[in-house]
Image (tube, coloured by chain):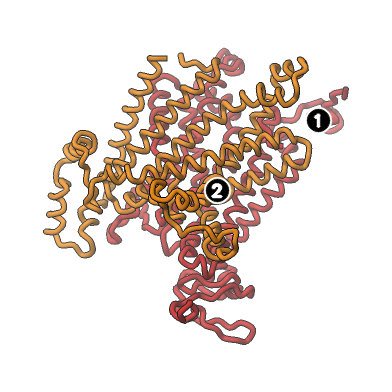
Chain colours: A red, B orange
């Protein structure tokens, strides 16, 4: 049987390192070290950051590599490849010589994966779409987690009527079938005549704004995050260290912020990447159904919808954004698993 | 047990009532939405709008409208859709078998496959199969289901349609079981598989995690030390407990799908089910149909969660309701 050597396992900083005392590492530092050793999770994080970086470089790509404006209709444009000038949208390529088909993948700088029904460069649009999808995905996940955290702390700590009201409200939102709620809010907000945009205080939200889907998706997932956090707050409330703090005369504020919150934080941190993955998938679905991101904005979901009409002739328009989604969500899932293993190795739910 | 049932039933009715009020308010109180104006088409003149308002009772005060709608829905059961001007309830009844065919078929597939995958991965822990199967599961939950459906369509309807493997696939759409069972089946195979992929991935992971967790429980060690064969230990002791979480999650997901959650698959494969109906009613701002589908959906979800709670309490005596 191996002897447990805290110094060797890096759990404790011995005398040489701290100049005198033997001190234990903080749990956060320990978690960090465990995470660093998980190469797969780090790789996944790197992949996700790479996708973010590539999406952010969309304007650069559009102006310098693709040399097009991916939001402007380009139905009559032409492009020169290998010295030959071809129409972006070619006529008469259907069975009976009818119909028009956009150009397919050229695997060159311009129209790398071809053009869509309006003659726009798909590769550039996919990058811009990434900006929108990632913005909404990350933003709504943060919004949901933040709101759920606040509500769960208040509900779990207060107990009684406040807890009851908040919990019932969350149950109500959750009982509403997920898509129905998002769809209702989106449809109602978006079905506005163009002359009367929605004004929330000093902020004007036009239908093309990305904030509308962001807030909708964020609100929809609050109950999902609320439940586990509240459960944890309830159980933490009964623990001895809280009792000790109360005996020391700690007020409610201090209890919540200095005792309960740090413990709940690790749950939230683990939930975040998984929530981002979920919100990205939800945003894609809503945009595909035309109730998420609206034109002229593009997101991965809207491009898949654009590609639907061209599916049998120019499949790349629909395939490419989907691949981006799969890679991003996969990376987030793997990283989330790694994060959970790092922050709670005693958890019996290990995916290793 | 009796009081539990009654309490849940009352809770169900309360939730449904609250939902209808919520839907009503969202629909009417959000500034800028005017269903009469939207129904009147392009460039409506005030008289047309006023006529439509009167015809559908939209000029009455809100509480009155609400009561009228509830009456039409439950009492006289002749609620009329705004867009098709036909009765709503028969529409939903017609759409239900489509959704049920889709969901039940997919559920059978995903339960079988996720048990195989999850069990296999847990049993084969330590070999190459475990991480491999889990990666497969991860990919399954990372794919947007509508995108997967499009890809499936691309291959089965277009690219590889001429090969023997996919030549039998009928065009997108639904054939009732009573009309032509073989066509019904052929038209549903790929929707079933597409819908299952996501859930197989999720449930395989859940099952595997549960199996590993219960592995270290005392009663499993006891069983093993009694000399019971490994297979018996797995099935009779380990699996049974792990299935509790599996079953309760399954109940909830099944309820959500029947309630219209399968709408993406229905849209991609052209199946006229409840999900599609819901989607059309929402984008067309067809309030009666919206209300009807919301009530239908909420009923099934609440029913499913109540049944799951009941089942959970029955399966796990530690969780009996107080």
Q: Nearer the viewer, mark 1 or mark 2?
A: 2
Taking B321 as reference, is B155 above or below it? below
Q: Quadrant of residue A36?
A: top right
Answer whether residue A136 is visible to the viewer in this image: no
Quarter holding the N terminus of chain B is top left
Left or right: A65, with B3 as reference point? right
How many other residues sit within 10 Å of disc 1, few (<14), some (14-19) or many (≥20)?
some
Which residue is drawn at the image coordinates 16% and 53% (left, top)? B52
Residue nearest the viewer, comparing B75 with A282: B75
Residue nearest the viewer, comparing B107 with A184: B107
Q: Position of residue A55 (x, y in %)?
A: 58, 60
Q: Which residue is mark 1?
A: A13
Task: Give the label on residue B10, or none.
Answer: none
Q: Quadrant of residue A25?
A: top right
Taking A63 as reference, is B90 above or below it? above
Taking A97 as reference, is B133 above or below it? above
Answer whether residue B303 is visible to the viewer in this image: yes
Left or right: B32, with A244 as reference point? left
Q: Position of residue A228 (x, y in %)?
A: 53, 30
The answer for which chain carries disc 1 is: A
Task: Give the label on residue B193, or none.
Answer: 2
Q: Position of residue A210 (x, y in %)?
A: 44, 55
Left or right: B227, with A267 as reference point? right
Taking B281 as reference, is A267 above or below it? above
Q: Position of residue B82 (x, y in %)?
A: 23, 50
Which residue is drawn at the image coordinates 51% and 79% (left, top)? A88
Contact (Cβ within 8 Å) of mark 1 with mark 2: no
């Amino acid at each position: 049987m191996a002897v447990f050597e805290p110094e060797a396992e890096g759990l404790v900083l011995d005398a040489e390192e701290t100049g005198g005392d033997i001190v234990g590492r903080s749990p956060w530092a320990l978690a960090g070290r465990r995470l660093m050793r998980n190469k797969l999770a780090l790789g996944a994080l790197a992949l996700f950051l790479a996708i973010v970086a590539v999406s952010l470089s969309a304007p650069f790509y559009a102006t310098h590599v693709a040399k097009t404006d991916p939001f402007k209709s380009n139905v009559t444009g032409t492009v020169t490849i290998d010295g030959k000038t071809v129409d972006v949208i070619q006529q008469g390529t259907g069975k009976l010589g009818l119909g028009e088909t956009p150009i397919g993948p050229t695997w060159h700088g311009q129209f790398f994966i071809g053009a869509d029904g309006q003659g726009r460069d798909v590769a550039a649009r996919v990058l811009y779409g990434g900006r929108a999808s990632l913005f909404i995905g990350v933003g709504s996940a943060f919004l949901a987690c933040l709101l759920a955290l606040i509500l769960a702390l208040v509900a779990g700590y207060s107990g009684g009527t406040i807890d009851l009201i908040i919990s019932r409200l969350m149950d109500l939102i959750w009982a509403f079938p997920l898509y129905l709620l998002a769809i209702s809010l989106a449809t109602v907000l978006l079905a506005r005549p163009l002359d009367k945009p929605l004004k929330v205080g000093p902020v004007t939200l036009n239908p093309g704004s990305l904030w509308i889907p962001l807030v909708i998706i964020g609100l929809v997932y609050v109950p999902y995050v609320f439940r586990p956090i509240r459960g944890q707050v309830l159980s933490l409330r009964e623990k001895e260290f809280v009792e000790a703090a109360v005996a020391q005369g700690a007020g409610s504020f201090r209890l919540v912020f200095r005792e309960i919150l740090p413990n709940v934080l690790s749950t939230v941190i683990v939930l975040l990447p998984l929530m981002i993955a979920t919100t990205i998938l939800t945003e894609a679905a809503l945009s595909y159904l035309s109730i998420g991101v609206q034109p002229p904005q593009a997101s991965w979901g809207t491009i898949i919808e654009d590609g639907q009409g061209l599916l049998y002739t120019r499949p790349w328009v629909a395939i490419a954004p989907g691949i981006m989604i799969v890679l991003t969500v996969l990376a987030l899932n793997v990283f989330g698993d790694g994060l959970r293993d790092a922050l709670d190795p005693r958890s019996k739910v290990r995916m290793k | 047990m009796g009081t539990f049932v009654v309490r849940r039933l009352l809770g169900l009715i309360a939730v449904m009532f609250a939902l209808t009020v919520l839907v009503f308010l969202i629909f009417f109180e959000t500034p800028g939405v005017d269903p009469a104006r939207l129904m009147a088409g392009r460039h409506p003149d005030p008289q047309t709008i006023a006529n439509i308002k009167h015809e559908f009772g939209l000029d009455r005060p809100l509480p009155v409208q609400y009561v009228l709608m509830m009456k039409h829905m439950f009492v006289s059961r002749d609620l009329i859709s705004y867009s098709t001007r036909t009765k709503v309830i028969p529409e939903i009844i017609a759409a239900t078998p489509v959704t049920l065919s889709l969901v039940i078929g997919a559920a059978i597939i995903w339960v079988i496959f996720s048990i195989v995958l999850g069990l296999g991965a847990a049993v084969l822990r330590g070999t190459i199969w475990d991480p491999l199967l889990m990666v497969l599961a991860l990919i399954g939950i990372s794919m947007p289901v509508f995108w997967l459906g499009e890809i499936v369509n691309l291959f089965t309807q277009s690219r590889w349609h001429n090969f023997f493997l996919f030549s039998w696939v009928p065009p997108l759409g639904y054939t009732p079981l009573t009309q032509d069972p073989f066509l019904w089946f052929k038209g549903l195979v790929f929707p079933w598989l597409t819908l299952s992929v996501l859930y197989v991935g999720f449930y395989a992971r859940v099952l595997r995690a549960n199996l590993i967790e219960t592995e270290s429980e005392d009663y499993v060690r006891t069983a093993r030390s009694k000399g019971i064969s490994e297979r018996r230990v797995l099935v009779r002791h380990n699996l049974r407990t792990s299935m509790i979480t599996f079953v309760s999650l399954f109940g909830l997901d099944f309820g959500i799908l029947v309630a219209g959650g399968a709408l993406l698959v229905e849209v991609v494969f052209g199946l006229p089910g409840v999900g599609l109906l819901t989607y059309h009613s929402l984008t067309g701002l067809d309030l009666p149909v919206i209300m009807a589908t919301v009530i239908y959906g909420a009923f099934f979800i609440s029913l499913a969660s109540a049944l799951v709670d009941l089942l959970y309490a029955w399966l796990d005596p530690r969780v009996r309701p107080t």
